[in-house]
Amino acid sequence: MQMQIKNFDDLELAKKVGLTELYPDKPKILVGMATCGLAAGAQRVYDLLHKKAQQAHWDGVVEKTGCIGFCYKEPLVDAVFPGNPRITYETVTPEIAESLWMEMAAGKIPENHVMARLDVDDMILDGGPRKFYKGKLTGFLAKTPRYEELDFIKLQRHIAMRNCGFIDPDNLLHYVARGGYFPLYTALTAMSPEEVINAVTTAGLRGRGGGGFPTGVKWASCRKAKGWPKYVLCNADEGDPGAYMDRSLIEGDPHAILEGMLIGAYAIGSNEGYIYVRAEYPLAVKTLQRAILAAREAGLLGENILGSGFSFDIKLNLGGGAFVCGESTALMASIEGKPGEPRAKYVHTVDKGLRNRPSNLNNVETWANVPVIIGKGADWYREIGTEGSKGTKIFSLVGQVKNVGLVEVPMGVTIKDLVMQVGGGVPESREFKAIQIGGPSGGCIPKEHWDLPIDFDSLWEAGAIMGSGGMIVMDNSTCMVDVAKFFLDFLIDESCGKCIPCRLGLKRMREILEEFSTGKGSLADLDELESLSEAVKDGSLCALGGSAPNPVLTTLRYFRKEYEAHILEHRCPAAVCKALITYSINPETCNGCTACAAECPQDAITGEKKQPHTLDPSLCIKCGACFEVCKFGAVAVA
Amino acid sequence: MITFSINGQEYEGQEGWTILDVARWNGIEIPTLCHHGAVEPYGACRLCAVEVDDGRRSRVVISCMYPIKAGIKVQTHSPRVLNVRRWIVQLLLDESPEAPQIKELARSLGVTPSRFQKTGVDFACHLCGLCVRTCQEVVGVQALTFGNRGLRKEITSPFRTASKDCLGCGSCVYVCPTGAMEQLFSRVAG
Ligand SMILES: Cc1cc2nc3c(=O)[nH]c(=O)nc-3n(C[C@H](O)[C@H](O)[C@H](O)COP(=O)(O)O)c2cc1C
Ligand code: SF4
Ligand code: SF4
Ligand code: FES
């Protein structure tokens, strides 16, 4: 693949070749091999299919691709047979893969384990939809649900994730085949840097790394800033536990990020870029390394790109994994080889950032949106989303929800739609209680507010933040005091310790919460907790401390009664806080099966076989083992 | 000259000055802990917090690092500022109830030890970093450094052994506002 892309003709040729690889005249099997797929066993599935195809001298292609979002149905395998819709198979074990293979080798599209079919590939950057087949579908194909009909997909719109699950991320030509690097060509040859900045500003793109700062405004300030060289940086630190949208974008479509950075660098006037990526993301790191090499070989990074005279190159920087290293000034310190500690930003990093030079930092997802804005135009992009928040946002939907995965939805989708439709609701017999939006320092929004549209400003008003897009769904088995403790613990662990409000203030907040969950404390402590939260928010150096009280403040705001129950009644309504709950056995329903007594690590439960058992509360350590094991609902917790 | 207001009164300062510079020049009291004229500001204690209204929004910033700008309105004792300051002093006091400087600060702000106060610690290090900065910037060696992070953050010598670079000059002990360096000194100097 030593193809040089030096001008428009080269780009066209690359696209042509890429298309024949992307959609060849022969059957193709795709295996989703991002980290989520691999975790579910995709490597074995891929190896098996690959080996079988080789042994059979199969006239078809077995290929890897990124994550399309259905993490709860991984491993996913797709069959793309020429003239037919693309069919997706779910939870494919090696055994299932083997049976699928038998049929596919015989030229048949398998009918079992089908999840959905895709009729058109919308190829947003390449002039529009490409239908997979002509005429009418018959048989099982006609009966298979279309992607767009799935609840999980219906509300989604893949813009940043446009290529994830479609291309082989290591194949530059695949990226070009779907319209990639054409926007770069447009920017370099038909637009001035100012026009590029204007487009991004007009499009209304706001930073996806958490703050929601208008991207075009940031670029314009950096362009204006005096100093040389200027740096363009990509934040791929992604330290939120449970959030992995950036990882998935990198693993599924690395060139989208490179192209975004190239366009940004041209607009800002920079020739040097860095991607700061978590070292704990080995596949993402490798994928980026390969993409950068491929882009360099093709001439898309380096000197005189696409014959425009513009030069730019990108270095990778591996992050040490501390959450706070994702903060802009800490990230820059870390690239400089200093401890990853934040510093005051009264002089902005666009003026004095990395090595005291003008530096523009954007998040992975922000960068991935840029080529689309240039390729489709700002007006096209503006149509998506809400007044103040344009475009889409990727969320990682986790917690007590049926469909766990990555979802990219237009800004403005309501919490309710996201949880109940996209997420498929909470597990049976449970009830949706709240959703934590924005990662560990986001906010908990209760069911009463589930009509809230998800956009930067609505979330901010509700006390939450967009953050990086982590979403944790909680049902009624969750105690909100416990939730506040949980997130504080994470943040206390991740605080760099430089400034006092964060280092000591969070610890004190945690101490007060601990009192609540052991039935101590008074109502006055709620006010204390609130004023301390404000002090930490106002007084902390960086946004880690500045947003760390959010989980406490929002749970206080929306679940005050639950706090009061702990304090006034020494009761944990969700029966989670150990010090406040007691286990007992209901003699009416206990039939003496002895299961609980066998399970109890404390021997706190006694009783004759077939006779009601009794539980000695003085021995009980409240581990809940009896509750879990009793099949007759005879163990009560209150 | 840059003109702006502090507590409703107009003041002037030069480009590059901080709010604290102008306040001190004019005798306006703002408490500080990690600031010292001889070394670069570090912005860790946050005690010097003030509220700044720049015409767009009002927010709490630290006066020892915030460069003055024309037209800003600075409040040194607004409710938000006092809340931040009181809590910092409360937290420090509970960490080391006997440290003279903290006791004095607490007295001036009406803060008393809380039920969370530590016992058995007289002079806890508050990680203001004055010793580290003095060692580097004034003495010109690097015998001191920060180790660890979060609640385990500490002042130590590089590689945690008696420092080869230490001249034994005692500048760190002299500059330390809490008395903690006195106890750390023997470990660092060897
Ligand atoms: C504690 C902390 C952690 C952060 N972690 C990340 C991160 O992992 N990824 C990221 O893109 N931004 C992170 N940010 C936000 C960055 O500081 C910065 O605002 C962002 O990268 C700017 O890019 P954007 O404008 O495209 O959003 C973090 C901020 C804080 C305070
Ligand atoms: S707010 Fe927390 S993480 Fe940020 S500088 Fe202060 S101690 Fe470090
Ligand atoms: S030892 Fe003293 S001077 Fe050094 S950081 Fe601690 S309190 Fe500050
Ligand atoms: S004196 Fe300003 S932060 Fe410490």
Image (tube, grey):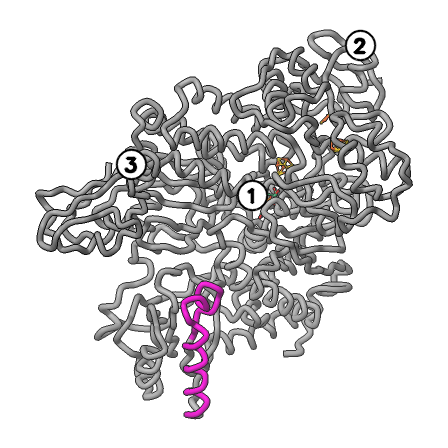
Task: In this rendered view, identify the residue nearer to me: A387 or A322.
Answer: A322
Q: Are marks 1 and 2 on the same chain?
A: no
- Residue A339, percent from left and from top: 72, 47
Secondary structure at badge 3 equals loop
Q: Is residue A384 rendered magenta in the image?
A: no
Hey, what amino acid is under mark 1?
A: Asp
Q: Which residue is pictured at 76% across the width and 40% down the height?
A: A352
Task: In this rendered view, identify the residue nearer to me: B101 or A100.
Answer: B101
Q: Is residue A52 rendered magenta in the image?
A: yes
The image quadrant that residue A343 belongs to is: top right
- Residue A375, percent from left and from top: 56, 55
In terms of sequence position, does the residue under pointer 3 or pointer 1 come before the other? Answer: 1
**Would residue A389 be seen by someone viewing this image from the given angle?**
no
Q: Which mark is residue A581?
A: 3
Q: CA distance from mark 1 to mark 2?
A: 40 Å
Which of labels 1 and 2 is toward the front?
1
The chain identifier of the residue carrying mark 3 reads A
**Would residue A433 be seen by someone viewing this image from the given angle?**
yes
